[in-house]
Image (cartoon, rainbow, N blue to C red):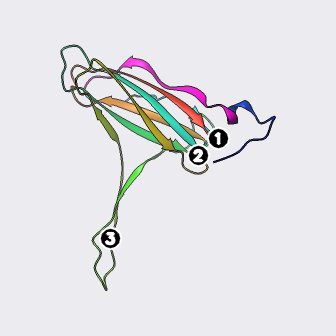
Amino acid sequence: MATFQPGAPQSLIHPQLVTLRASAVLALLSAYDAAPTEIACPSFTRLTLLCSYTRAAQAPGGAVTMRLEFSPTSIAGAGTWYRVTELAAGAFAAGADTVNLIQRSTTTYTSTAGPVERWLWDLELPTAIERVRIACAETGTPLTPGTVEILGLLSV
């Protein structure tokens, strides 16, 4: 945990609240957001997502899939985006190499019963990341999409 001296910039002492996705209805047919909001995050090491999903009326089974991406480039609208990955360790056998599986990852939140559901997603930001974005898609009821809002708290 970092300690700060008097006179440290306020952005390092207090978390910075940002909007990663303004409250809006998701696109039809499980399409991801076409232009997700990019958030600058240099010098930050943590991002806590404050997520809110409202499923469409008369649409039980709603779900939102989120594609979290990171960029080491500081120029907005430029650079390459990298997705988070999952690693599955292969079976270990004496005298043989082990093959691990790695794959890009998305995360799906499936609604339970409430009309509005909120949750936290606490992340450690990868080293030397300059920007982050998150694209969302309705994957539970593609013909009756719900509404998603995602705020973020950047901190060190």
Find the distance from the CA under tag 3 to the CA under tag 2.
29 Å
Neighbour tally class for label 1: few under 14, some 14-19, many 20 plus, Cα within 10 Å: some
Instruction: Assign a secondary structure to mark 3.
Output: loop
Task: Confirm or deny contact between disc 1 and disc 2 (CB under 8 A).
Answer: yes
Q: Residue 101 vs residue 35: left or right?
A: left
Question: Quick one: label 3 or label 2, which is nearer the N terminus?
Answer: 3
Q: Residue 84 vs residue 112: left or right?
A: right
The amino acid pointed to by label 2 is Ile
Depth check, front residue: 14 or 109: 14
Instruction: Assign a secondary structure to mark 1.
Output: loop
Depth check, front residue: 126 or 133: 126
Q: Which residues are magenta?
A: 13-29
Residue 122's spot in the image, x, y percent?
Answer: 47, 39
Neighbour tally class for label 2: few under 14, some 14-19, many 20 plus, Cα within 10 Å: some
Is any part of residue 122 visible from this angle? yes
Does residue 86 belong to the magenta stretch? no
The amino acid pointed to by label 3 is Val
The amino acid pointed to by label 1 is Pro
Question: Which numbered marker is on residue 99?
Answer: 3
Q: Is residue 79 above or below residue 30?
A: below
Question: Which numbered marker is on residue 129?
Answer: 2
Question: Quick one: label 3 or label 1, which is nearer the N terminus?
Answer: 1
Q: Is residue 53 above or below residue 79?
A: above
Does residue 14 belong to the magenta stretch? yes
Give the residue at mark 1.
Answer: 42
Instruction: Assign a secondary structure to mark 2.
Output: loop
